Image (cartoon, helix red, strand yellow):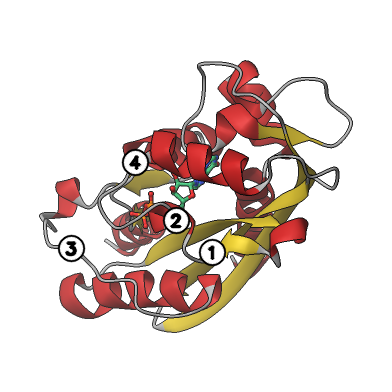
Amino acid sequence: MYYFCLINRHIKMNKLVFATNNQHKLREIREILKDKFEVLSLDEIGCHEEIEETADTLEGNALIKARYISEHYGYDCFADDTGLEVFELGNAPGVISARYAGIDKDSKSNMEKLLNELSGSHDRKARFRTAIALLINNEEYLFEGIVNGKITELQSGNEGFGYDPIFMPEGFDLTFAQMSSEDKNAISHRGRAISSMIDFLKNKK
Ligand code: ITT
């Protein structure tokens, strides 16, 4: 009986909800965490409501999403909020990356707006920054992942999502959208933030 409980506890500890409505992110995270954690989607726990991201920092928004799931559904969970920070534009679009071209706009419009804002500019340095909030056993933890790079003049590649076709990571001649998901995950903002979270969870057990 005691043995059974231990196994059960172990299985439960390996389940984590990822609080995102972005199916691309979900796929990336599942690939990164495969073999380590069973990642449950919002759909799988029956959460279909919109969680409003009202904070003015990535960390604040990640915490809002993770706290919502923990409070309303009682699961251990984590959430990520990601921003593209362009130095020439004072780190815009940053926390408003998803709605840079307007509330109803999509990635195509966001990229077009960014390329217009940067047209003629020689300084195209940028970085992706991800903040992850983890809520486990009612305790909160934050992790960060950054990848430096630049904004290209044109869109290239069909992989990935969001701003990937115009972001070229430092040390590469390819945009994220020209890389396989495995190669992107190995160096990306999200991959790095998740690695920190995995290291933390390993040491916690
Ligand atoms: P959730 O809040 O439901 O997780 P979201 O799509 O709103 O999903 P974010 O606010 O974190 O996610 O993302 C802000 C914007 O940055 C959004 O337009 C994404 O498409 C884009 N983005 C996030 N991660 C990206 C990545 O790895 N590569 C390219 N663009 C990314």
> Who's the residue at 10% across and 54% down the image?
46
Residue behind mark 4: 106
Residue behind mark 1: 132
Q: Secondary structure at mark 2?
A: loop
User: Given this view, does label 4 or label 3 mark the residue nearer the observer?
Assistant: 4
Query: CA gap, disc 1 to disc 2?
Result: 21 Å
In this view, which residue lies farthest toward the right? 171
The x, y position of residue 118, in whole percent, is 68, 45
Mark 4 in CB contact with mark 3 (< 8 angstroms): no
> Which of disc 2 and disc 3 is earlier in sequence?
3
> Which of disc 3 and disc 4 is earlier in sequence?
3
**As drawn, 143 above or below 171:** below
Quadrant holding the C terminus: bottom right
> Which of disc 2 and disc 1 is earlier in sequence?
2
Query: CA gap, disc 4 to disc 1?
Result: 23 Å
Crowd around label 1: few <14 · some 14–19 · many ≥20 (10 Å): many
**As drawn, 25 above or below 138:** above
Is residue 199 in sight in this rendering?
no
Q: Secondary structure at mark 4?
A: loop
Q: Secondary structure at mark 3?
A: loop
Amino acid type assigned to the residue bearing label 4 in the image: Asp
Left or right, residue 80 beside residue 43: right
Quadrant holding the N terminus: bottom left
The x, y position of residue 101, in whole percent, is 40, 51
Amino acid type assigned to the residue bearing label 1 in the image: Ile
Mark 2 in CB contact with mark 4 (< 8 angstroms): no
Residue behind mark 2: 100
Pointer 2 residue Cβ closer than 8 Å to ligand 1: yes
> Who's the residue at 82% across and 20% down the image?
173
> Which of disc 3 and disc 1 is earlier in sequence?
3
| Marking on residue 50 | 3
Query: CA gap, disc 2 to disc 4?
Result: 9 Å
